[in-house]
Amino acid sequence: MHHWFRSLVFAGLVWCGHPVMATPGTALDWSDLPDPSAQVFDDPYRELSPEQFDDVLFVVRIRGRLQQEVGSAEERQKWQLLLAETEDALVSDGIDVDWLLDQREVVTERRRKAGTSGNPQFDGRTITLAGFAIPAPSDPDGRPVAYLVPERGMCSHMPPPPPNQMIRVRLNGDWAPSYFHEPVRLTGTLTIDPSVHNMMVVDGLMPMNATFQLEAERVETLETEADRLEWKQRAADRIRAAGNRKTGGAQASK
């Protein structure tokens, strides 16, 4: 449980950018998109071992319990002893718990910037980038829209990427993805234009939080026969699962 909490709250979102000059049609990698200046920062939580991190969480939990009017006198005495032992162990490792806890908001903000800040070097440039396209509702002006992500499964059976690893794409009308995570290579004008749009995906309503927008000028589909077969199989599985839910599993027994 502690390890899950750690990964949820303090998982690093650090991507290393490369100072590459963008020329028209220059192929970029996803690691080029985050702002390099926001990627390097002090994060004292990253230096903790799993055991030390668990001890810090234990201190927070026991301190909170002792601040409440709960537990018998015997239980509270036991908690005090456990708290003192844990704090002493952390001090012996050179860890100042109070200072560390004071850094939580600072570290959270640094990590937020690392995951949301776009590389200004490519703002307004024409670039080419390969990824996986997710179909999205059209804009109010009727312009077709998609999202481009670096890995298949993101925003569906996997969590969404950091905002600076997601691109909202305004398509030119000649093509639109026919299924989730269709592999493509896009060329167009990239701008830093943060946006959040809620849309339905396979697992329900998802906030699509993107740092970038791309005005697509050229689309190259990278679909293989294996991709098509996989998509057909997944579609058949979803239809079969939906039918089983509606019939209470009756179809599965036939």
Image (cartoon, rainbow, N blue to C red):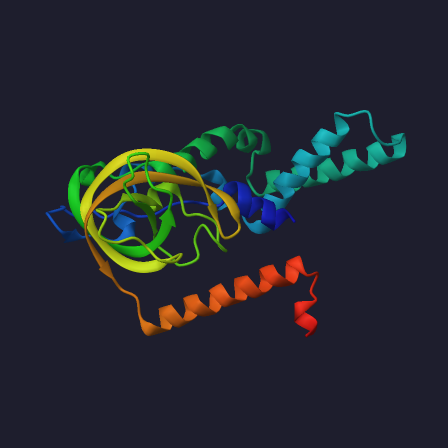
Q: How many marks?
A: 0
Q: Is residue 187 left or right of residue 24?
A: right
Report if residue 144 is visible in the image.
Answer: yes
Residue nearest the observer in this picture, 235 or 83 = 235
> Residue 100: x, y in percent?
54, 33
Residue pictured at 85% horizontal, 35% vertical: 75
Using the image as rendered, state which of residue 70 and residue 168 is in the foreground: 168
Residue 228 image point, x, y percent: 37, 69
Quadrant of the drawing holding the C terminus: bottom right
Q: Is residue 248 left or right of residue 97?
A: right
Q: In this orientation, which residue lies closer to the viewer: 45 or 21?
A: 21
Residue drawn at point x = 41 percent, y = 45 percent: 13
Q: Nearer the viewer, residue 176 or 113?
A: 176
Answer above or below: position of 60 versus 187: above
Q: Is residue 25 left or right of residue 49?
A: left
Note whether residue 19 is visible: no
**Quadrant in which residue 239 is drawn:** bottom right
Instruction: Please determine whether, in this image, residue 154 is positioned above or below residue 66.
Output: below
205 left or right of 116 in image: right
Q: Residue 79 sits in which quadrant?
A: top right
> Looking at the picture, how far across and down is residue 16, in whole percent?
30, 48
User: Residue 98 location, x and y as percent?
Assistant: 58, 29
